[in-house]
Image: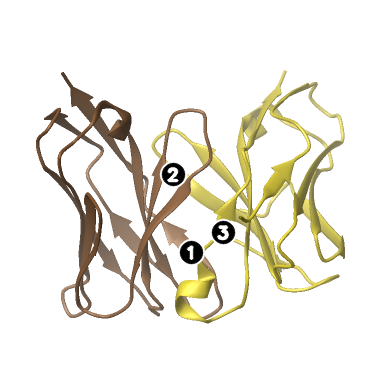
Amino acid sequence: GQNIDQPTEMTATEGAIVQINCTYQTSGFNGLFWYQQHAGEAPTFLSYNVLDGLEEKGRFSSFLSRSKGYSYLLLKELQMKDSASYLCAVGDSWGKLQFGAGTQVVVTP
Amino acid sequence: DVKVTQSSRYLVKRTGEKVFLECVQDMDHENMFWYRQDPGLGLRLIYFSYDVKMKEKGDIPEGYSVSREKKERFSLILESASTNQTSMYLCASSSIRGSGRRNTQYFGPGTRLTVL
């Protein structure tokens, strides 16, 4: 099985940078996914990492270290619309995803 | 764009009723999933399906069953609803099993079910 840990909540100011950490212990690993979920809405796909290193996509970047069982999602130049829950998920070879409980990011003016 | 739709956004049922939640995807995806989402617990997998008429139990299948008669449609059934099944139910689909990035799951808008 999988054990996935991420902080419950983080608060940051508009324009700042926030880093959301995710640690995992797995019996199988086939990629790490990050999703964004606004209140009352469905999760939407943000990023995917399967190799070690940093993947950059605009204001959002995701990092993976497989040997450490560690990933982070970096949100730069925070905007009010970035207030949401961010979900870390680990994929297995069967196509299933195991999700962490999510990190609620609160962006303040 | 992938589109996953669910039959209802909000549903209120009484204890003991049989409840059907429907999910339809329009991208010819092989894999479909049903999750429930509760505060502090995150998304938990109830059932999934890799193909028509195939189903596999997820982490919390008790009290639920599923049906997949057509590739695009995956139904979740609560045979006898109970108050502890009050939750947000999310359906998702993905293209191919075990293929890394193609395991990206696309979610429907969710059904908030209240059982009284």
Residue type highlighted by circle 3: Asp
The brown one among the chains is A
Q: Are marks 1 and 2 on the same chain?
A: no
Mark 1 sits on what residue? A97
Disc assigned to residue B59: 3
Q: What residue appears at the point 34 percent right and 73 percent down from the top-left corner?
A: A26
The reply to whether callout 1 and callout 2 are in contact (CB within 8 Å) is no
Helix, strand or loop status at disc 1: strand
> For the residues carrying marks 3 and 2, which lies nearer the camera in this image?
2
User: Which image quadrant is residue A24 in?
Assistant: bottom left
Q: Amino acid at mark 2?
A: Gly
Query: Distance between the Cα atoms at labels 1 and 2?
Result: 12 Å
Q: CA distance from mark 3 to mark 2?
A: 13 Å
The residue type indicated by label 1 comes to Leu
Labels 3 and 2 share a subunit:
yes
Cβ–Cβ under 8 Å for marks 3 and 2: no
Q: CA distance from mark 1 to mark 3?
A: 11 Å
Mark 1 chain: A
Estimate the x, y position of residue B115 in percent, counting from the top left: 71, 24
